Image: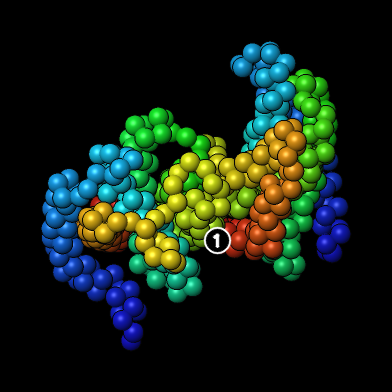
Amino acid sequence: MTVIELLRHDLRLQMRRPGEWAALVLFFIAIILLVPFTVGPEPELLRRLAPGLIWLATLLMSLLALDRLFVDDARDGTLDLILLSPLPLPLIVAVRLAAQTAMMLLALMLVVLPAILMLGMNVIVLPVLALGFMLGIPVLVLLGGIMSAVTISLRRHPAMLTLLLIPFYIPALIFAVAACDAVASGVSPLPHLLLLAAMLALLLPTAPFVIAAALRNGQG
Amino acid sequence: MSFTSRFANPGKFLWLAERLMPWFAGASLLAFGVGLTLTLFHSPVDYQQGETVRIMYVHVPAAWLGLMIYAAMVVVACVGLIMRHTLADIFCTAAAPVGALFVALCLITGSIWGHPTWGAWWVWDARLTSVLVLFLIYCGVIVLRRSFDDHASGFRSSAILILVGGVNIPIVHFSVNWWNTLHQPSGLLRLSGSTVDVHMLRPLLVMALAYVFFAAFLVLMRMKTEILKRRIEAALLLDEDNGPLM
């Protein structure tokens, strides 16, 4: 199996379960929908909070999507076969992460526009929000992959994965939202985006190896 | 056989730990006695902070210990992954709650100091946030390690988490310089020399010594308990009649 075939296989698997992604998309919309009822429908307040709320909903959605990375495969035995593959495990992991990132970005493309309209977000923030997604979603997926692999052999409580991930999600969230806020108040968002890019640059080459080691430890 | 490998044997380590523990406890009590006297009666009042400066003597060493224990866990987790000493697992299991305790102490005393000084129990400053993240990582390590029944795979999983979380340590240390938010930068660890007055530095260093001995004592005691607990587990498994499954 070559890498291209592997990627096509992973993407096809994701595409063939559209119901689950539809549920995630609706979950995102549901969170945004609840906001005006929790903080009040004041347009000025919603406009100011919009980037942070969109990122919060994204983070929760990515937590819910995590089981699709390795846990479903561990449950039905596919993971044991993947571990036996002659291809290097970090490569398989990297392809899997890329497919998950692509699907997350696709789902976000669908929901971000309604969310912006519902919250009345300032349109000049949109390019920075999109750039933040391009840099931030891979970070969320890579971190999620690490924690999901570390807990793979456990009969887990969903709260545990959240506890493990939240401290690592916090920096990504800070920089992504700070970039949006900077643009909204007329300052350059570049420093925050660069820090987010630095996180990605740190994780991208290391995470697949860490995840591969954790998966072997969990199933071995 | 090198020194480290010899005491990597749990039995030998237990022998050493039992001899060191009373000394550490005694040294800690002595240093706490001297340190608290200096802190409460023989240290000057800060010209800006007034009497609340005395909270600093319990706050700063707690923060140091919280960071140092995590740094030690990173090194030991690394060694444990490579050399596969069981003692590495026992250290990380035993030290994580102690580290979490010191970070919690740091957050609580900082909060008590912040209320009169900054006018708020909590602010979302870079230093405070990164220390809170450190506390959450400690909690994650503890919860993850405890949910494994198998020691070998439990150690490797939590060691991976410890190593990934190690990224936060330099962030905590440099947060006061990188983000110029509310928390004041360190006055002690500077290339240009300490900016802390010697009358304040002396009680601070004595208190730090007391904390170090106290932490060493706690970690050794918890390691001893962990070793004995595992011996009991192993004995129960061997003796089928008293097996835990009965």
Q: According to the image, label 1 marks what residue?
A: A217
- Taking the spot 15% from the left edge, 62% from the top edge, the residue there is B27
Q: Chain of mark 1?
A: A
Residue at 32% over, 40% down: B49
Residue at figure coordinates x 21%, y 67% from the top left: B17
Q: Where is residue B50 shown, x and y percent of the image?
A: 28, 39
Residue A157 in view here: no
SS category of the residue bearing label 1: helix
Q: Quadrant of the C terminus of chain A?
A: bottom right
Q: Is residue B164 above or below residue A175?
A: below
Q: Is residue A159 left or right of residue B113?
A: right
Q: What's under tag 1, amino acid-wise? A: Asn
Q: Is residue B151 above or below residue A152?
A: below
Is residue B75 or residue B88 the one in the foreground? B75
The spot of residue A69 in percent (x, y) is 69, 47
Relative image position of residue B134 (x, y in whole percent)? 46, 48
